[in-house]
Image: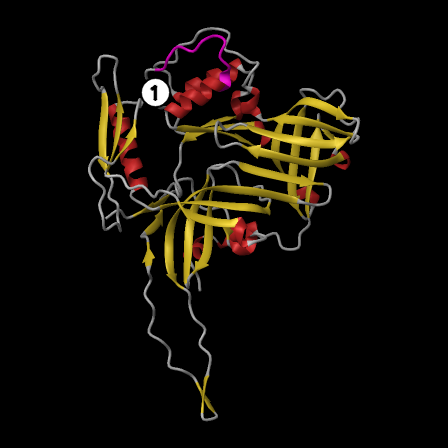
Amino acid sequence: MQTLASRQGNLAKRRSHVGDAKPGFRMEIGGKDVTPLVNSFSGTYAASGGSSTMEIEVQRGSLSRVQGQMCRLFVGYGDPDSYVEYFTGKIEEPKSNPFSRTDTATVYGPYAEMGEPASMMEDVDYSGWTVEQVMLDLGERSNQNPRFLEVRGGRVEVIDQDIVAAETAPYEVASSITDAMNFVLSDRPKYRRLVMPRPRPGSTGRAKATYTPDDVQSEEDFTIEPLNAVLYAKVIVMRRADDGSYPVWREAAVANRGVLLKPPPNHVFWVTDYPGTNAQAGDKAAQEAMWLSRVAWSWHLQDIALNPDLLLYDSVYLEREAEGVHETYVALLEDDITFGGDNSGSLTMSVGGTAILIDSRPVEKTYKPKATTGIFRLSPPPEPEPILWSSSLKWDELGDLTWDEA
């Protein structure tokens, strides 16, 4: 059976399956290849705050005089010349362990480098600045190259932002302002940084890969569970002023499709202290209401083959069969991405986030001949079974997943 995901993501699916190709990695420190000296590595692309770190263990004496040098990890399958850069950061805290005869160090990505002990050095009022302007200024204060910063949709104006104290770390300011504006931060390979509006499943372009239970070691490593068990009647986005008035107040009803028992009107999803304008609040309320009207799912894949194409806020397809029904989900990577490898050839990652069900239909049955009085004959073919549910899914010109809300 050709499913929705297989029709739209065949190329992505092939890229996620490495077959018999041998996994491998290459590590460089200060431009020098240290791969033969590496025992193991493990890292995290953190969803909360967007920073990234990696722990490395190497043979003793390999990390002398490397404090502050750039560490680059390349991973791939098959030909080493095809390995791609997956993690980049600066080495901090190198230590020698005389008992295990190894050296260890922590590698910090660019957003982590903007944290303490760095500081603003002066009080700053960012009111009236755009998100893009704030991030460029914070990068300059942290000696970050502006060419390595990607800002999507960052021309939104920051409103009612408190004055930032001189002793505050630039990373703390970036995290606070983007969180209030419903933006997210993310470290990327090649020491790059990303700032973008918080996405929803299906809003970050076409899926990069398709995963099924066949891609994990056990059933417990492939989980999809209901997420939003609470039903809301409406969304209210607001900001209260010091005098008790509401300069920002917008509402949007939640459709709750497929629900027989409607929630009472006082079941409200609140977004308080919203820093934007009324127009922005209206868009925010509509987006949240649309999201809450659909059943959301949480998902997690444990210890799958490391796919260097997958980064935070990318999309993948998930396919599974449950109780005779084949289900397809579009899933967003918005939980921490953890990864690791060692000199034995292991190269794995664990990913997760939220998903929405986009296709559900009965599994096609295989009909075998029936025997009657020693003569074989085929049973008559059954009537076609109806699709249980399928969204009117389509991709817009920007590559975003959309559907008919009617």
Q: What residue range appears in magenta?
A: 161-171
Secondary-structure class at tag 1: loop
Q: Is residue 49 left or right of residue 292?
A: right
- Most foreground residue, 253 or 128: 253
Residue 70 position within the rendered picture, expressed as x and y whole percent measured from the top left: 66, 25
Q: Is residue 282 left or right of residue 308?
A: left
Quadrant assignment for the N terminus: bottom left
- Identity, as a three-letter code, of the amino acid under mark 1: Glu
Per the image, is 165 magenta? yes
Question: Is residue 313 left or right of 64 when viewed as pictured?
Answer: left
Tell which of 114 and 246 is nearer to you. Answer: 246
Number of marks present in the image shown: 1
- Using the image, determine if residue 107 lies above or below residue 348: above
**Residue farthest along the top direction in this orientation:** 122
Residue 20 is one of the magenta-drawn residues? no
Residue 87 visible in the shown view: yes
Residue beneath label 1, please? 157
Q: Please report the residue visible at 40 percent of the width from the left and 82 percent of the height from the top.
A: 379
**Helix, strand or loop for the magenta stretch, by majority:** loop
Q: Is residue 123 left or right of residue 274?
A: right
Q: In which quarter of the view is residue 205 placed?
A: top left
How is the protein colored in the picture?
A: secondary structure
Name the residue rendered at 36%, 15% in the picture.
161
Q: Position of residue 143 (x, y in %)?
A: 56, 16
Residue 6 visible (yes or no):
no
Tell me what residue is drawn at x 34 percent, y 71 percent.
Answer: 384
Residue 21 x %, y %? 67, 52
Image coords of residue 94 (percent x, y): 71, 23
